[in-house]
Each structure stands twice: as C-alpha cells, then as structure tokens.
Amino acid sequence: MTEKRTSLPRLPLTNKPRIPGFSRWRRYFSAYRFALPYTLVMLAFGLGPGLYALLLSFADFSTGLPRYFAAGFSNYLAVFKDYRFNFAFGNIAKFLMISVPLGIAMVVILAILLQMRPGRLTTALRTLFFIAGAVTGPVLVLVAIFMLDPSISPFQALLKGMGFELLNDVIYAGSLPVLFTMIGFFSGAGMWIAIQYGALEAIPTELLEAATIDGCNAWQKVLHIKLPLIRPYIIYQFILIFAGNVQLFVEPQILGGNANVGVGANVPMVWSPNQLAYNFAFEMGNFGAASALSLLMLVIGLGAAYTIIRWTGFFNIEN
Amino acid sequence: MSQFNQMSPDSRPTAWHGWKQFFRKSIGGETGFLGFCLRWAVLMLFAVYFVIPLIWLFLAPSKSAPDLLEQNPLAFGSFQRIGDAWQRIMEFQDGEVLLWAFNSIQYAIWALVLSLATCIPAGYILAVARFPGRRPLLWATLIAMLLPSSAMVLPLFMELNLVHLINTKWAVILPSAFFPFGAYLTYIYYSSSLPPELLDAARVDGCSEVQLFRHIALPLATPLLGLLAFINFIMNWNNFFGPYVLLNNDKLFNLPVGLQQFVSATSAIRPGFNPSPGVYVGYQQAEAALFGLIMVVPVAIVFLFAQRYVVGGAFTGSIKG
C-alpha cells in the first residue's frame, strides 16, 4: 500500500466528450426555476423578518421613527432591565417545568395503554383524544373558562369539593402554570398520542414475541423494549413541546392581557415573555426592545429546531 | 392444554367455563387483573377529561344563562334557545360574523393556492435534482418547519409595517404562502415514490424539464395533495396570533380574532355582571359557545379524516408545541 502508484499514461482527451460548464449551469438553471418561487417566499417571510428584527434591535425609536444603529445594545439592556423580564421568564420557567415533563409522561402513558391491546374501544378513545385538538386558540380559552367556573362547570362538584366558589378562586397567579398545562394538554395531547402510538406500532412484532417467549410480562415489555425503542420520538416531543410552550401567548393574553374577555382579574397584563414583547411593541411603542426580545425568543426556537435535526436523526437530508 | 383439560370427562365445558375463559382472555392476559383495572381506570379518567368539555360545548348553545346555573351541566336545553343564540350572534355588529367566516375561508383558500404553488415545485426539484444551494435550502426548510410559528409573528409585523401592508388582507395571506412543512413533505414524497429511471426514460423521449413535472410528477402527487391541504387548512383556519397582531380593522378579521372581539365586546361570558360602558349587553354563554362551535366543527370533521396520517407517521414534524 505504501508503494507509490504510478499514474496511468495520460491519454489525449481532446476527443472525449467533455461536459461543458455551460450545459451544467443550464441544468442548474432549470432546477432553480422550480425552486425560485419557494425560495423567494422563504426569503421574504422566513429570513427577512428575522434579519429585519435584528436590524431593528439596534435601532433607536425614541423619536417614533427608527434611527438605525443609533441604539447600540441599549434595547437589549432595556429588555433585561425591565422589571417584568424576570417575572415573565420566571412564569414561563414554572410553566415549562410543569407542562413539559407532565405532558410527555401522560402522552406516553396513554399511547402505551391504548396500543397495548388495540380494540374497537381503544381506537374510539384515540380518536376522541385527537378530536379534542380541534378546540384551539380563543375557543380553547373560552371552553377552559367555562370548565373552571364553579357555578356552571360540569366539574363543579370537584371544584366545589376543592373549596372553590368563584371563577377567580380558581384562576389566580399561583394556579396559572397548572391551568395552562391542563389547557395545553387538552388541545395538544391527541396529536402527540397519535404520533407516539404510530411509533409503538412500528416496533417489530418478532421482537415482542421473542420477549414473551423469554418470559417478559406486559409491563416488562413496556419498560425494557417499547420505551427504549420510542426514545427518539420522546426526545423529539420533548424539544418541540419545549420550543412551543416557551412561546406561550394566546392563553395568558386572552385571560389577562388587553384582549381581556372580562375574566381573570387575577391575571397580570404581562405574564409570558411573548406578551412582554407584544407589550413593548404595542403598548409602549418601543419596537427596538420588542425586536430584541422577539429575537431572543426566535433564537430559543432556532436552537430547538437545530437540536432536533442534529440529534434525533429523524430528518435525513441526504436520502 | 386447557382445552385438553376441558375435554376430559371430569370437567365438562359449562357456561361457567365459558365465562372463565372469556375473563381470562379479556381481563387477565399478560397484564394481570390488577393491570387490567389500572389500565382502564387511567384510560377512562382521561376519556372524561377530554369528552366532558366537548359535550358541554355542544350542549351549551341550547341553554340560557339561568338554565346553565340551575340545570344539570350535561342536560339539553331547547332548540329554541339555539335559534335565539344564532339570532343574537347575527345582531352583533350587523352580522359581522358572516364576514369573518368569509374572511377565514378566503384566507384559507389563498394560503392553500399560494403555498401549494410554491412548495410543490420546490419539494419536487429538491428530490430529483442536485444543484448548488440544495443543502442550505433543505436545512432552512427543516428549521423553518420546526420553528414555532408564534416566534415569527412580531418580526413579521415589523417587516410588513416597513412595506405598509399592515391592516390589509395581504398581511395575512402573503406570509401564509411560506409553507416549509409542505415543501418538506413533497420532498420526502418524491424522494421515495418517483423512481429516477422514470424521469430518465421520459428525458430520452424528449420531455423537457417542465413537461416532466407537469405530465409525470404532478399526476403522481394526488395523495400528497390531500395531506397538504388538510394540514394547510388546519394551520390557517386556527391562525390567531398572526391576524391578531397584523390586523386592526374588524372588517378584515378571521373567525378566531372575531371570536376574541365578540367575547370581549359583549356580556357573553359574564351575563350577570354589570357591563362596562360600550359593552353589548344581553349576551349569554350560549352565544359564545355557539360561536366557538362554528370554528371548531369544520376542524373536527377534517381531524376525523386526518388521524390516519398521523398514526401512519406522515405528520411527524407538523406539530408546533
């Protein structure tokens, strides 16, 4: 191997048809024609807003009109020093600590219980969980308000048993992380249960049969075979739920923000970081600070997306 | 072995045996009796959690505010009351709800047409051709697809503000043309279901690249179109944060923002309380629930058909939070 290989005698290449650069570029050009419209909308509505927000985060808005690069890092400082910054991120941290582990655990448990012995009833249940996902956004908050109101809720026996008499006994600052978790779970769990169910279905039956023959009972199979095999999906769910929940906006905004629907007197105007960014922009007119904060939120989302692509191996770019 | 025992003269197959057999099969099994009970207890508990609010939402429009307080929460009121609720919704700002529903449909159709027109050719070419810039384009598509859409709303507002599109219907429609998940699904679809030999054969026969796409790739995409249309419809129909920030003019609202406006401008949620000035009075929960149903029912119907895609794994990546 170490001996140096003599190269083959060079042949005159003049007769050999060579792919001219021109024709290659013509082929590329034909490909670009197909990709062009999509690339344009991506630049306009994917990359463009991000870059413009970056530009604005260094702009000074004290006169009402942006003076680019006049602010330096003062917008970022204004965000970090705002008295609501720690409050909003503290809230979202509490919400994440409850909603992410609990959401994943419940979804995985339900998917496993459903898929363990499929039948007509379990299929119906899966569909039921899934259909609940049709209730989103303002309708979801509306339904939640009704469900939490001890005077009209179908769960009123439970609520009154816990000592709640009025809606505002249920909705208060301390209960918000739990309430948002319950609300999000109601709407989002069905989709994830279906995904995890699909992952469980994809486990080869031979593997489970072999385990049965070796004396595994159903619970051992769950613990030692199914859970390890759906781990990538659990990681995937973890990152996406985390990235999605960090962006919480609609629920606290409708309950307490200026979109207040007449309830939630105990809900502060600004509860989540996205609300703070919204507040900077539309209540205080400080678009520089709003841009700085929304960039921070964007970076969290980008980091999560990058982590999924790199670590879960779900998205194969080279086919 | 057990069958053999049953057939032996000492123990004849009796009804009792049949039942025992049945219970062993359905209850015991691998999980054991305790496991069976635990499994169904958990499943039923969550069934209640998911189904009661849905049932309540369907029943609420049939009841007046006093009915809601006094009757069993899961009792049915009257059809008369549903008609009244509809009447009241129509009275709100001169039947603006119809305009909002029209806007919702209009935005959804525009989004569908524009996003399919951009993402299908792009997904196709990413799958069948190799060209400089392909990898960055795929990476950008994946990242945009996994990024929660609410992370982009404020930056989008700043940008559209720069070009004076805020408060026009294009502020909602144009950004919805960017549908990275659609491009990615198209790419995966053609990568796995369009053999390169087929395209080569057509090229030898003198097909141009555009003809290849129109006469070979597009007709193959029919099943894909259904899936893309589902996802796209759900995303746009439910879009609240975007229109909420980008639109000020109530004539342009879609149903989600309209519902928020309806609930905050009427007494629908707290009928018993003294309304603040300027609030439309006389509205009750029934109206709010009926409005909610108008939004939810189309999506629920779409969901019934879409579930098999999710379980089949086609959806992985479409969920954002």
Image (cartoon, helix red, strand yellow):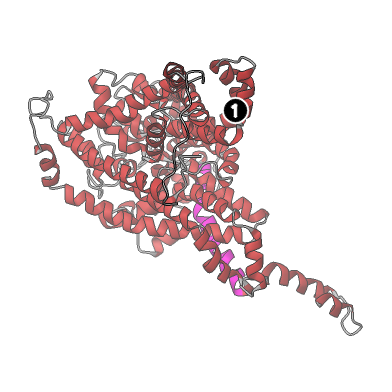
Vertical placement of A275 versus B180: above or below? Answer: below
In the rendered image, which quarter is residue A250 located in? top left
The chain to which mark 1 is attached is: B
Single out the residue that lies furthest toward the bottom: B10
- Does residue B82 show up? no
Give the residue number, with chain letter if any, for mark 1: B221
Vertical placement of A302 versus A181: above or below? Answer: above
Chain part drawn in magenta: B34-59
Query: Residue drawn at (13%, 32%), measured in percent from left and top?
Result: A58
Number of marks present in the image shown: 1
Query: Residue drawn at (12%, 29%), measured in percent from left and top?
Result: A59
Single out the residue that lies furthest toward the right: B9
Any magenta on residue B36?
Answer: yes
SS for dot 1: loop
Horizontally, residue B147 falls left or right of residue A52, namely right
- Does residue B217 show up? yes
Q: Position of residue A317 (x, y in %)?
A: 45, 40
